[in-house]
Image (spheres, grey):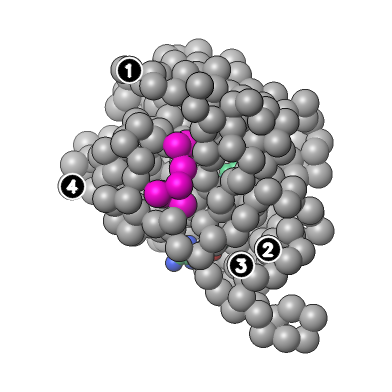
């Protein structure tokens, strides 16, 4: 049987950690996978040991992504490649892991260069909103590239995964004609410290990861206001209900996914305990500086996903005249873009009509 070649499209904080995992599995399962894992790097010049160098060259010499995942050594079979078309041409399994704002442009560059039976797995947390309504990035990738695309998402803060601290993740993979089986896809990612569960509910997996970023910002605002654990848990509970309602109202997602799988409740909790969205939102309240300034100051080139997702979800819900049915999402949008006082989050936590 043909050995599959794995390629990673993206090399940020999570992109590099995922490439490390794929590289380890390509070596561990040599009968299934080709050893070389190509990782597309959006090329940039960095300052390294007092010299200006290309990020790809430094990575291929040191096996460390010194800008986005410093201090972590990747296996030497992970190769940084500056041309995304080369990754497209040479991969059977394409793992997409770029910040959501860039994926459409990256797909346009890859289009026409893919292997005929390639499949994709999207690790991107966000939703695409346009004139056709709201779409999953796995569907955007699928349409743009003419391939099936599943989703991987879970409680996976990249720096912790890269240090091989145990975590779980969820893969949504349900192709109509599986040329590459779910078991083969699981084998690309499953490690002793990275425990994969595969489910059919692709939309639920994608939406858990996208929408929890909005809730993590709400909890970050609460941290900034020094509200206690009880109040923050109330925000998380209401956030989880809005995540579940969004996924089951606008997509064919199962109610259980959000409350049972790592891509739902567990990702919500880890992100609210101190992900990037949470940290920036806390600093927003404490410093009064604009969110985009704090993103630059605190994240060293990594990108915030929660504020833009709150905006995209708000735009979509406005077209449906349903913003008031998602009061927590609406408030995060208002705090980020309409100068709402974060203290107003308390009003959002009044009992829901259907509960009282
Ligand atoms: P990141 O936040 O580290 O972003 C930096 C990356 O964006 C770099 O690779 C940079 O080269 C790239 N970039 C900058 N400008 C670009 C451009 N014009 N075109 C293309 N790429 C450009 O990225 P990340 O942490 O790897 O996040 C990718 C996705 O994974 C996001 O959707 C995120 O929500 C998700 N995710 C992140 C984590 C995490 O802990 N970091 C965990 C799980 C999922
Ligand atoms: P942040 O982008 O808020 O750090 O969240 C990372 C994540 O998705 C953890 O699963």
Q: Earlier in the sequence, mark 1 or mark 2?
A: 2
**Sequence order check: which comes first, mark 4 or mark 1?**
4
CB of mark 3 within 8 Å of CB of mark 2?
Answer: yes
- Magenta segment: 87-93
Q: Residue at x 53, y 70 (%)?
A: 43
Look at mark 2 in the image and give the residue it sits on. Answer: 60
User: Tag 1's secondary structure?
Assistant: loop
Q: Earlier in the sequence, mark 4 or mark 2?
A: 2
Query: Which of the marked residues, 3 or 1, is nearer the chain's N terminus?
Result: 3
Q: Is mark 4 within 8 Å of ligand 1?
A: no
Q: Which residue is mark 3?
A: 56
Is 24 located above or below residue 276 in the figure?
A: above
* Residue 286: assigned label: none
Give percent across and percent down for residue 44.
55, 74
Q: Are marks 1 and 2 in contact (CB under 8 Å)?
A: no
Residue 131, numbered label = 4
């Amino acid at each position: 049987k043909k050995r599959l070649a794995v390629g990673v499209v993206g090399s940020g904080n999570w992109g590099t950690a995922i490439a490390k995992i794929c590289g380890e599995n390509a070596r561990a399962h040599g009968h299934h996978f080709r050893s070389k894992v190509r990782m597309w790097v959006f090329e940039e010049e960095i300052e390294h040991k007092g010299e200006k160098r290309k990020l790809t060259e430094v990575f291929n010499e040191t096996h460390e992504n010194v800008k986005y995942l410093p201090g972590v050594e990747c296996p030497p079979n992970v190769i940084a490649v500056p041309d995304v078309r080369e990754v497209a041409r040479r991969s059977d399994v394409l793992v997409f892991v770029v910040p959501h704002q860039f994926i459409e442009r990256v797909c346009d560059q890859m289009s026409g260069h893919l292997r005929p039976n390639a499949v994709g797995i999207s690790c991107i947390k966000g939703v695409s909103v346009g004139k056709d309504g709201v779409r999953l990035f796995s569907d955007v990738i699928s349409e743009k590239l003419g391939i099936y695309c599943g989703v991987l998402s879970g409680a996976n803060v990249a720096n912790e995964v890269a240090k091989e601290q145990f975590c779980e993740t969820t893969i949504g993979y349900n192709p109509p004609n599986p040329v590459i089986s779910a078991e083969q896809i699981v084998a690309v990612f499953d490690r002793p410290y990275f425990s994969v569960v595969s489910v059919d509910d692709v939309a639920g997996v994608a939406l858990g990861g996208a929408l929890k970023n909005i809730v993590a910002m709400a909890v970050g605002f609460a941290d900034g206001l020094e509200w206690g654990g009880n109040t923050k848990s109330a925000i998380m509970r209401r956030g989880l209900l809005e995540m579940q309602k969004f996924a089951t109202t606008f997509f064919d997602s199962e109610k259980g996914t959000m409350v049972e799988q790592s891509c739902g409740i567990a990702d919500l909790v880890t992100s609210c305990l101190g992900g990037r969205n949470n940290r920036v939102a806390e600093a927003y309240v404490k410093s009064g500086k604009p969110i985009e300034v704090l993103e630059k100051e605190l994240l060293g080139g990594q990108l915030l996903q929660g504020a833009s997702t709150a905006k995209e979800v708000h735009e979509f819900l406005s077209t449906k005249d349903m913003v008031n049915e998602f009061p927590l999402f609406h408030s995060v949008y208002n705090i980020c873009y309409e100068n709402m006082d974060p203290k107003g989050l308390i009003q959002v936590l009044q009992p829901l009509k259907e509960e009282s």
